[in-house]
Amino acid sequence: MAEMETLQESKQESSEIGPTDLLLAIPAPPSSDTLAATVAKLEEACGLLSMPCRLLLALPAETSQEIPAPLPGMEPNLPGTSALHFVNYPLPPPNPGAIPWIPNAAMYRALCQLAHKLNARGCTVLGTDLGCNRDSLTAEKLTLLMGPAIEGNFDLVMPLYTTQPLDDLLNKSILYPLTRTLYGHRIENPLGNELQLSSKMFPPLSAGASQDSTRAQGRLPWLATVAANRNLKICQVRLGTRRPSSSDGIDLSDALAQLAGPLFLDMEDNAAFWQRIRGSHEVPTFGAAETLSEPAETVDVRRMVDAFQLGESNLRDIWSLILPPVTLLELKKLSRLSPDEFHMEDALWARIVYDFALAHRLRNIHRAHLFGALTPLYLGWVASYAVEINKSGIAAAQQRMEQLARAYESEKPYLLSRWRWPDRFHP
């Protein structure tokens, strides 16, 4: 077992903590059982690393809170292991109304500032207590996250989860294909909670802490953008099956606003960069892929199709402020289809997302209403996708996601034209 110490960053300078190779961070207050299990896995992972290193575990706590060391059941000071020490860091308060499992930008800034102060070579963020499947986060998979910083090969290591075809659809339908198309890297989970940052990522992510605007403080950390803008090396690691985060009590329009909204803001800030990107490329991927079983039941899409048809009837005037006439005509045709025949073309969906990103930039309507108007269109896409999965089964799901992403890329000239000359195709 590894050596344990209680260190409080608020009371000790980084020189007292000593040199650090890697900062390991838990981004949510863990329970005692969760913390003990996580530390045990980390200690096991230390023995699998390619070289000895000094690790520092950052735990969120009030500055006056003491963390017991050693933890119950842990044996300190055994020879032949890397030293694992503890440090507290103040967890920033959550944004009011924020979905709990969405990454906190202020938390990333605080961790990068701490890692930079400690002169760490990297920072590994663990998804403990943030909806991840802790049982699947083995020592071997932890080394996949931790190793790149120790060996110095990659600057951003993102997670690649195995998900059921009808899970994580907002990521599959908007976040992943849009991020891939904009910045050229095929990072399948651009908002993953388990990741690795090298020291090259610390300065740009720490810099946001000095900005006082509400817009800057509420932004999600689009790490792929930061890495791509600086031509840093990116990879992803397979971390196994991911348990869907709970959506109980979360309004779909709010989820779209809190996930797609920051990506639309990111598009505005980095337009000069992504307009030069053409196509996309695979990023190195490590770890063994897992096989999914076929879903036991098909999905009833009638309620989703009903929501789309109701939106087409009631929101036509609002959609006309966002979408060009040819898209409105295609949506009208779609609204006449039965649930079993319902099919939304990938290219149509990609153009819809692009048009809503443009409307977000131009503020054609209030942004709170914008995502309400997008909701029935998103449900229409989900219904169309579910009809295909019902017919084709799980084997076609991955292929469908690749087809959708390629449609986004094919329609990028449409986005460029609309972005540069927004009035050309609009009444």
Image: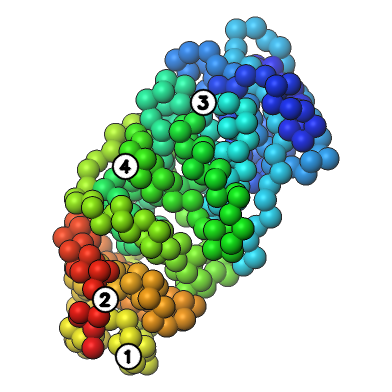
Q: Mark 2 vs mark 1: which is more N-terminal?
A: 1
| Residue at numbered disc 2 | 422
Q: Nearer the viewer, mark 3 or mark 2?
A: 2
| Residue at numbered disc 4 | 291
Disc 1 marks a residue whose amino acid type is Arg
Disc 3 marks a residue whose amino acid type is Arg
Alpha carbon distance from label 2 to label 4: 44 Å
The residue that appears at 46% across and 62% down in the rendered structure is 262
Most foreground residue, 414 or 291? 414
The numbered dot on residue 316 is 1
Disc 2 marks a residue whose amino acid type is Pro
The residue that appears at 55% across and 16% down in the rendered structure is 53
Q: Mark 1 vs mark 3: which is more N-terminal?
A: 3
Q: Mark 4 vs mark 1: which is more N-terminal?
A: 4
Tell me: 7 left or right of 403. Answer: right
| Residue at numbered disc 3 | 121
- Asked whether the viewer can see residue 60, the reply is yes
Mark 4: few, some, or many residues within 10 Å (few <14, many ≥20)?
A: few
Task: Estimate the x, y position of residue 365 in percent, counting from the top left.
Answer: 42, 83
